[in-house]
Amino acid sequence: MTTPILGITGWSGTGKTTLLKKLIPALNQRGIRTGLIKHTHHNMDVDKPGKDSYELRKAGAYQTLVASAERWALMTETLDEAPLDLHYLASRMDHRTLDIILVEGFKHEAIPKLLLYREGTKHSVADLICDEYVIALVTDITMHHSLPVIDINNEQQVADFIAEWLKKQ
């Protein structure tokens, strides 16, 4: 059995991370254990210069696993790899400890998604791209749509929707 994956998508500035910071605790309170995959367009490094793990990775290790009693992290160099594969990334997670994997970004993936829209961003509501994978709109405006519309400022309402969706998976 694989863990259900749910995308949290929307244009930059719609509040994806802000919502997730409130949504994850709301899901945890319901007993739903969440994993998260966040896509970034920026060059990122979770390690720090001067740390042994950083220096060893920079020395040429293609994979570096750093572990402590509290957490562990696996860093994999992907410079010569094909574009990121969401399902491959999800397969690296420990599904025994998860009920759902939330994905921030990867908006063009063929996965169920919540599409976020916030008034005041540089896009209009007419620009919303609802592909066949969007299962609900999460917004701060009143709108009528064939899809469920959820208040972006009410993480409990979003968590309730996700909990009901998970029961059907």
Image (cartoon, rainbow, N blue to C red):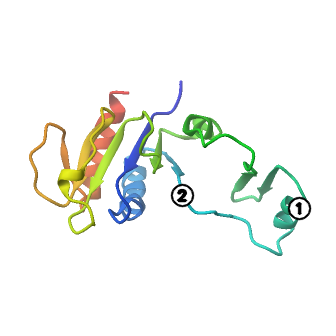
**Above/below status of 158 relative to 136:** below
Q: Nearer the viewer, residue 88 or 154?
A: 88
For residue 126, above or below residue 167: below
Report helix, strand or loop for mark 1: helix
Q: Provide the secondary structure element on which disc 2 rests.
A: loop
Q: Amino acid at mark 2?
A: Thr
Distance (Cα) linking label 2 and label 1 = 24 Å
Comparing marks 2 and 1, which lies closer to the viewer? Answer: 2
**Crowdedness near tag 1: few (<14), some (14–19) or many (≥20) residues, C-alpha within 10 Å:** few
Can you identify the residue that label 1 sits on?
Answer: 56
Using the image, tell me which numbered label, if any, was put on residue 40: 2
Q: In this orientation, which residue lies closer to the viewer: 29 or 85?
A: 85
For marks 2 and 1, the one nearer the N-term is 2
Q: Residue at x 84, y 59 (%)?
A: 57
Residue flagged by tag 1: what amino acid is it?
Answer: Leu
Residue at 14% over, 37% down: 146
- Where residue 161 sits, quadrant-wise, is top left
